[in-house]
Image: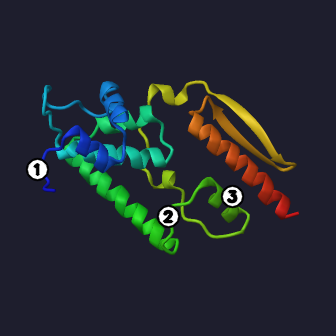
Amino acid sequence: MSENEELTLKDLCEESGLPERTVRFYMAKGIIPPAPRTGPGVRYPRAHLTRLRLLRKWQDAQLPLEQIGKLLAGLDDAGVERMYRSQTAQTAETARAAGGSEVGSATDYIRKALGKTSSPTHPAAQMPPLPPTEDTFARSQWERFVVDDDVEIHVRRPLHHTKNRRVEALLQEARRLLKETL
């Protein structure tokens, strides 16, 4: 597919791996721009696909959607392309450094911290620093989980249900790993 070729919504969804409903949600929220025109046969510039792919990379790095929207809003199409290429190169370099494996999970991080196995740098560490916003210093509600006598994990609430599941898995794995070391 050429760089100037435009995509249908179906193509955009297939290539980004996102459902149509999610892409429409991002457009409605202003996270990605709407189609340049409306009506039957509407087409999207290739830059929309790059924005969606970059958005997914940042989501994988656990950035909040609101923050992602602000970052994308500050980038023109060329800036999005540069940032996406940079993030893709960093991810590939991290995977190579880890012996070809994908970027690890929180579980991998805990294992590394406990000396169980090596793990690559968390993807959030590869992200550019986020510009401060007025909500950066907003009050948060934190929940404290005691994993072991000397170990706590703090979680800011509320969390999306998928992150809740991940936190629960992290807590279970942390407890299991700490029991192994005794």
Q: Which mark is residue 4?
A: 1
Q: Which residue is at a point 14% across and 53% down the rendered structure image?
A: 3
Marks 1 & 3, CB-CB < 8 Å contact = no
Q: Which residue is mark 2?
A: 102
As measured in the structure, the alpha-carbon distance from the residue carrying label 3 to the one carrying label 2 is 16 Å
Residue 89 lies, with reference to residue 69, above or below; the image says below
Is residue 20 rendered to the left or right of residue 138? left
Mark earlier in primary sequence (1, 2)? 1
As measured in the structure, the alpha-carbon distance from the residue carrying label 1 to the one carrying label 3 is 44 Å
Three-letter amino acid code at disc 1? Asn
Mark earlier in primary sequence (3, 2)? 2
Q: Which residue is at a point 41% across and 50% down the rendered structure image?
A: 57
Instruction: Answer with the quarter of the image where residue 23 lies.
Output: top left
Residue 15 lies, with reference to residue 66, above or below; the image says below
Q: Which residue is mark 3?
A: 110
**Residue 27 placed where, x, y %?**
30, 29
Mark earlier in primary sequence (1, 3)? 1
Residue 94 or 162: which is nearer the viewer?
162
Local packing at callout 1 (Cα closer than 10 Å; few below 14, some 14-19, many 20+) is: few
Instruction: Answer with the quarter of the image where residue 77 lies.
Output: top left
Local packing at callout 2 (Cα closer than 10 Å; few below 14, some 14-19, many 20+) is: some
Three-letter amino acid code at disc 3? Ile
